Amino acid sequence: MDARATHRQRAPLTVDDLERVPDDGRRYELVDGRLDVSPAPAYGHGVIEGRLCFHLNAVAPDGYVVAPGVGLNLNAERTHHRIPDVVVLHEEDGEHPYLTKPPLLAVEVVSPESVFRDHHTKRREYAAFGIEAYWIISPAADKPGIAELRLADGEYSEGRQAFGEDVFETDFPFPVKLVPHWLLAAGPWRKHIGG
């Protein structure tokens, strides 16, 4: 490679560059300084996020924050930036504009284009960042499910799972009961989502 070719190489993108990205509804993340673009979430995805945040906020003790779409800077260079669908953190760990410390919980709602990313790539990245719990929600219309992963020795191990009308129950980041069916089903979901 000659000196001119080296000079033409672009510097890695950082979160500062994301400020110049158009606000077009897509989700823009960074992976090692490269842009990773996802389409805007579909209706069902948004319903699940909204109901999950509603329920988690209803059962969260004081001092916890439940928030959708919060950016995480996964490295000090700010070239690796992810946006989980939902995070839970201690109130005192909130930072502006993006989190630089791991939240207690990250949640991803799987979309058709994000299956590999959510089950493999983000699983590895979130574990390396130190997020203690990671929930993957599969929004299958006939039988939605939740899988919990818990951090141990730098890697996630399989935790609890629940599908359809089974009750998902965990004690972290605080005690939660949740019926996956009611994350998306029509009807009195507020009454039944907690089991």
Image: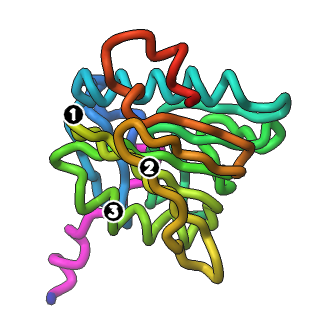
Query: What quarter of the picture does the C terminus occupy?
Result: top right
Residue beneath disc 2: 162
User: Residue 127, position in %: x, y?
Assistant: 54, 69
Q: Nearer the viewer, residue 150 or 21?
A: 150
State which tag comes first along the sequence, 3 or 1.
3
* Residue 119, disc: 3
User: Residue 158, position in %: x, y?
Assistant: 49, 69
Q: Are marks 3 and 1 in contact (CB under 8 Å)?
A: no
Q: Is residue 122 left or right of residue 98?
A: left
Query: What quarter of the picture does the N terminus occupy?
Result: bottom left
Magenta range: 2-17
Dot 2, crowdedness within 10 Å: few (<14), some or many (≥20)? many
Residue beneath disc 1: 141
* Amino acid carrying mark 2 in the image: Ala
User: Could you tell me which secondary element the residue under label 3 belongs to?
Assistant: helix
Is residue 4 found inside the magenta-colored segment of the image?
A: yes
Q: Is residue 41 left or right of residue 18?
A: left
Q: Nearer the viewer, residue 108 or 181?
A: 181
Q: Nearer the viewer, residue 18 or 83?
A: 83
